[in-house]
Amino acid sequence: MPSASVAIAPDRPFVPTRWFAKTAATQTVSLSTLVRDMPLRRRMVRSREYVFRAGQSRHSLYLVHAGIFKTSILSEDGREKITGFRLPGDLLGLEALDQARFTCDAMALDVGEVWELPCEELTERLPAFQQALTGALAAEIRRDWHWMLSVATLTAEQRVVAFLLDLGSRLGALGFSAQRMTMRMTRADLGNFLGLKLETVVRALSRLQSLGLIQIEGHEIRILEANRLSTLLVGGTSVSEASTAALAA
């Protein structure tokens, strides 16, 4: 069983771990279980519909029950930065917990469902809710650290590999397939999140497919060789080098 701590060697990049995905999943499932019998407002959302926009008054948080959502912020000159892709069990609006208004946009990338969580009311009625909320906030901080380290220490192509492995682990922890993923986000969205240009993302995915590590069919990506993908992150071999070696062989 993985250790409850992650050691980061100074001479190697931080690599996404299954421990991270399981930690987040365990926290969010417990929060979902805690409130599932409460008379909450359950809201269905369409693809590309906003749950809330930055600047909108915040009266509640939203728990993702179904679907996938992206959160993003805008710079003063209108540039968008995607801050995450939220899956079932994740909370939307945590960053505005101490604010009267939401500080980011939350948009559905597929048909989904969110549960409205009136925090003050739930804290009064459920003594364990505050602890669960604190745990969710801590998991969010760890997730942010995880991607800060990934973006800072991994090459562009390795970031794409890290994202695929991390998303597969998160989906697997929720009971879905960890190998077959429907990518509701666009390639441009993925690049925005990872700090990469669209053409870099497309090129990296094409190389991974040419190496037989993944299979791309429209919006669906299948991970064929998870262990070999992980090797690209820890072995010091870039996707470009692996592709060159495969061609030479």
Image (spheres, grey):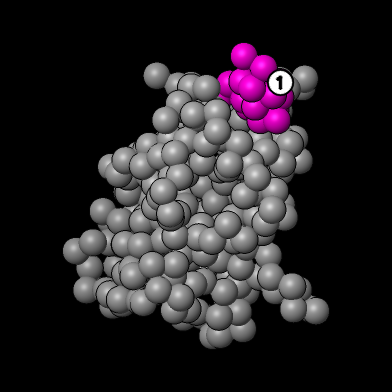
Question: Please, is residue 43 above or below residue 128 in the view?
Answer: below
The percent coordinates of residue 94 (x first, y second) are: 53, 64
Residue with the mark numbered 1: 236
Query: Relative to the observer, which residue lies in front, 39 or 71?
Result: 71
Query: Relative to the observer, which residue lies in front, 243 or 76?
Result: 243
The percent coordinates of residue 210 (x first, y second) are: 55, 33
Q: How many marks?
A: 1
Answer whether residue 247 is magenta in the image: yes
Task: From the viewer's perspective, tell me whether residue 143 is left or right of residue 167.
Answer: right
Q: Main secondary structure of the magenta part?
A: helix
Question: Please, is residue 243 above or below residue 49 in the view?
Answer: above
> What amino acid does circle 1 point to?
Gly
Q: Which residues are magenta?
A: 230-249
Answer whether residue 231 is magenta in the image: yes
User: Which residue appears farthest toward the left when viewing the image?
Assistant: 37
Quadrant hosting residue 240: top right
Q: Is residue 57 visible?
A: yes
Q: Is residue 149 visible?
A: no
Residue drawn at x 42%, y 30% as measured from the top left: 224
The percent coordinates of residue 190 (x first, y second) are: 59, 55
